[in-house]
Every structure is written in structure tokens, then in C-alpha cells.
Amino acid sequence: MTQTETATEVAFQCTGLHKRYGDVIAVDGLSLAVRRGECFGLLGPNGAGKTTTIEILEGLLVPDAGDVEVLGLRWASHEHELRQRLGIQLQETQLADKLTVEETLKLFRSFYHRGREVGELLQLVELESKRKSWVSKLSGGQKQRLSVACALVGAPDLLFLDEPTTGLDPQSRRQLWGILERFRADGGTILLTTHYMDEAEVLCDRVAIVDHGKLIALDTPKALIATLGEPKVITHHGTLEDVFMARTGRRLREE
Amino acid sequence: MNRGGAFHPLVELTLARLREIFREPEALFWAFIFPILMSVAMAVAFPSSGSAPVPVGIRAGEGADAMRATLAASKALAPRLVAAADEARALRDGDVDLVIVPGTPPTYRFDPARAESRAARLLLDDALKRGAGRPDPWTAVEEHVSLPGSRYVDWLIPGLVGMGIIATSVWGIAFSIVQARMRKLLKRMVASPMRRSHYLLAQVLARLLFLLPEVAVPLLFGRYVIGMPLRGSLVAVAVVSLVGALSCGGLGLLIASRTKTFEAISGLVNLILLPMWIGSGVFFSASRFPAVLQPFVQALPLTAIVDALRAIILEGASLASPQVATELAILAAWGIIPFVVALKIFRWR
């Protein structure tokens, strides 16, 4: 670890991010700073700008304005070094159907100068029994775990996950949460986007709620829920869903 | 460098691509089985002996039977009676090359644009006039020369090999890239520390390894089953195949550089391949096109591959021969220009 990093303790930060696509403003002046070892959640409804924000942080999109610093480095000058130290899982990536689980992991492993053994990784994501299976034969949960394994293959300092559990059944979700908790226990930093409130409450130290590309709340899940005050009619515990509703007057996931 | 048991990224990427190809049965069919089926079909359809009697039709009616007896005396002709109603169909389908209507003088009905029909007219005319008592001033001495390599099928096989080289290069590379883009896999790859040049190079390398069986199988089949001559050196065949595949790989890369759907890429591939299959002399000689079109026809990459392969295989030309060297230069231009443009405009998202 270099001196600057121990000094700052900041895993990544961004200030005044702006990104627009034609008439649509995807990100509108967003600033965040996430500490090392933290699990940080980016919450919001579909179209809130979560994916655009995370892809800017991942160096896959260039913002129209604003500044990004990851592990004390900038994308323009240190892209290759950053890629070696980041683990990235994208929304909707479909890995090659006709490669086996092991072949896929070996392929990704070959890109990194350091990292885990494929066998160790298979154990970590509980896919040892699927080692020789084609990717096309995996269930949704298994595919998602493989996708996370591909992000973990270089033993990253920082893990970016874009809606890692969307569309998974409850058991697969919990399995994935376990993997992420183990990564954190080893000192890793996580940024994840989700629209599942329970996921953010379980996994995240702090969450930022975004809507229309703007930050509308940022705190620990507990503190955010506490701002709701005592419910007038006691039906259930306050959740982040209620926080979102209280601040925007809308539900998070409008059907 | 610790790669945790994995090979160099270029090797892993190439292996991954090769595995994908070999796990796709359709790809294997088009690359290996199809050229053989084509060669067999052509060998059956165009038998090597050029001495099969020429089928001519005689319009049924008065004098038809006498005419038939006269013509049957000539070994070069296979006369048969054709009903007037069936005449047009028989001519169109090539059942007969010419129809004769008996009379004094008889009428020859044929399409002068067909070489077979013109030949039939000469044979028939000769046979009839001789039958009518025409004296011949002399009879030429005929020397029958049968040259291996002069059969249509011998000429066709190098053409099919060339067609296979370009088809797999363009299809294989373009489809694989568009598929990866559609699956957001390209984006995932560039989110990792993979070098972009490694990815593109691996596509081309995998394609080149695939080339070896793809060229060898139909050539060996042609050589040992059909009896096609192989006069030039195998090294020269390999060099032309390699340069041809690389060159068309550049085209594949170019059309895939921004395309986002299978529909669009299929259209682009067909736009490139179909005109070349017709224009490049795979099935019939490109020299049949009028002189105005020749510069275009000769500049096509498939024309260059096919002409170079034929010169080497059938005529024993070497790489240094002016013809092969020119074709290689054309191919190099086709490889470099699209490749450079493709790299400039390529979209990884």
C-alpha cells in the first residue's frame, strides 16, 4: 500500500458529476466519497442514474463534468493500473455460453498480474461442482455467482457491483450476500447499486439514495430509517423504502 | 508474473475463441463438410469425360423417324423425339441442346448464347450433311489429349477453397464480435485489465488456426478422391490462404466495428460476400465479365485468392510469379486498409 492511500483512507470519490444523453440528464451534480473497507450502497428507482454513476466510477463512461478519483488515481492517467486493482460486475453481462465455468475464470484470471487460484475461487462462490459445466447450463444464481467470481479473480481492493442480485430467488441472493460479506471481512471495499431495500439494509454501512441523478439522502441505513420518526400507526418497522417515499412522495419500484 | 495457472492472455483468449468455434457444430459443417459436398456434387454433375454424346431433340412428326436413324449413325449425337408441346421445357432445362424440325431444309432451334447448343449445331449440321452425301475434302487427324486439371471440378475446388476462406473470415470474426457486443461481453472485457489489442488479435489468430483444416480438407479430398492435380508447392498454397484469411479478417473486423444486431451484421456480410461469389469466378471464370467490369472484378479480394490458388494448384505457379505476387499485393491492400479503419472506429460498448 502506498503512502497516499494510507493517508487518505478514501477508496474512491467523485465531485460534481454530470452526465446527459441528449435531453435526458442521467447524473446531475453527484458527489460521493467512500472510505476503505466500507460497503456503500447506491439506491434508487430504475432510471435514477445509478448505472451511469457506477460506470463513470468504473472508467467506462466519461462524465460531461466532474472529477473522479479511485484509489488515489485518475482514469485518464492510470487506467491499466486501476483495472488491475478493481473488480467489476456489470448489469446484464452474458458470459460466453460455450465455455465452461473453469475456462471462463481462467480466461479472466490471465488478465491480472496477481489474484486467486481458480480452484480457490470456485470454492468461494460455491461452484466447484459446476467446474466443467458450460455457462449456458448454469442457473441464474450460478451465472451471477460466476460473474462475481470473474470480478474477484484479480483479488481486487475495490469491488463495483451493478444490481448483483436483480432477478435472483431469495436463496441465491443470500448466497451472494455471503460471498460479499466474506470479501469485506478480508478488508475489501464494495460499491453496489440495488433497488432492493432489504439488500442495502443487510449489506451496506452507508447508502446514498439517488433520484433523477441527484443525491437525495446519504447516511447509514439505520439513521435514514430513524429520520422517519415513530410511525403513526404501528404496522411494520420503517424501511429504506419508506425513507424514499417520505422524501420523494413516490414508491421506489413503481410497477 | 503470477497468472494463477492461466496462460498468457493472448493464448487464453485464442483458446476461448477456438473452443467456441469447435463447440458450434454448424460452424464445422460450413467449414469442412460443405466444400466436400459441393465438390462431390460438382464431380457428379460434370463428369470428367468430355465425350458424352450431345443430346439433340427431333420434333415428332413427318420425317422424324428417318431423321433419327440418320443421326443415330453419328456416335457424337444422342437423338430423341420431342413432342412439340414439350420442346420449350426440354430446351430450357438442358434435356436437349438443340431441337431439329425435319423438312427441306430442316430448321435448327437453339439458343446461340449457350456454348453447348452452338457445339450441338455444328455436330448436327456435319452429321446431316454427311448423311446427305456431302464429300469431305479431307479428314483431319485427331489427337486426343486429356490433361489432368482441365476438368471443371479441378478448376472448381480451388474456387471453393477460396470461397470458404473468405466466408469463414468475414462471418467468423464479424459474428463473434457482434455477439460479444450484444451480450455486453465486450464491455465486460474492457472493464478488466485485458489489452484491447489482445482481444482483436485473438479473434484473428483463432481464425488462422481454424484455417489449416479448412483449406487442407477440401484440397486433400480433391487430390486423393477426385484426382485433382496439385502442381505448385504446399507452402505457396499456405501463404496465399494465410494472407487471404488475414485480409478478409480485416473486412470482418471493419463491418463488425460498430454493428449492434445480428440482422444488421447478416446484411453487411451478405452485402460483401454475395457479389463476390458471383463476381470472383468461383463457379465460372471471371474473365467472362465484359472488359469495362474487369478492373472491379480483378480488384475483389476473392478474385485475388481464387486466381492465385488456381495458378499455384493447377499451373504450378510459384509465389514469385508475377500473377501470384500481384494477387498477394491486392490482398495486402484489402487487409491493411479496412483493418486500420476498423481500429479507428471500433466501439467496445
Image: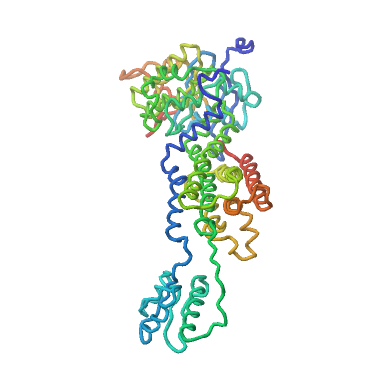
- Nearer to me, A90 or B219: B219
The residue shown at (41%, 41%) is B25
Residue found at the very far bottom of the displayed protein: B104
Report whether residue A224 is seen.
no
Task: Locate the N terminus of chain A by quadrant.
Answer: top right
The residue shown at (50%, 49%) is B223
- Nearer to me, B322 or A120: B322
- Nearer to me, A217 or B151: B151
Q: How many marks?
A: 0
The spot of residue B92 in percent (x, y) is 43, 71
The spot of residue A55 in percent (x, y) is 54, 29
Residue A182 in the figure: left or right of residue B229: left
- Is residue A44 shown above or below B110? above
- The answer to which quarter of the image holds residue A164 is top left
The spot of residue B220 in percent (x, y) is 49, 46
The spot of residue B213 in percent (x, y) is 50, 41
Report whether residue A149 is seen.
yes
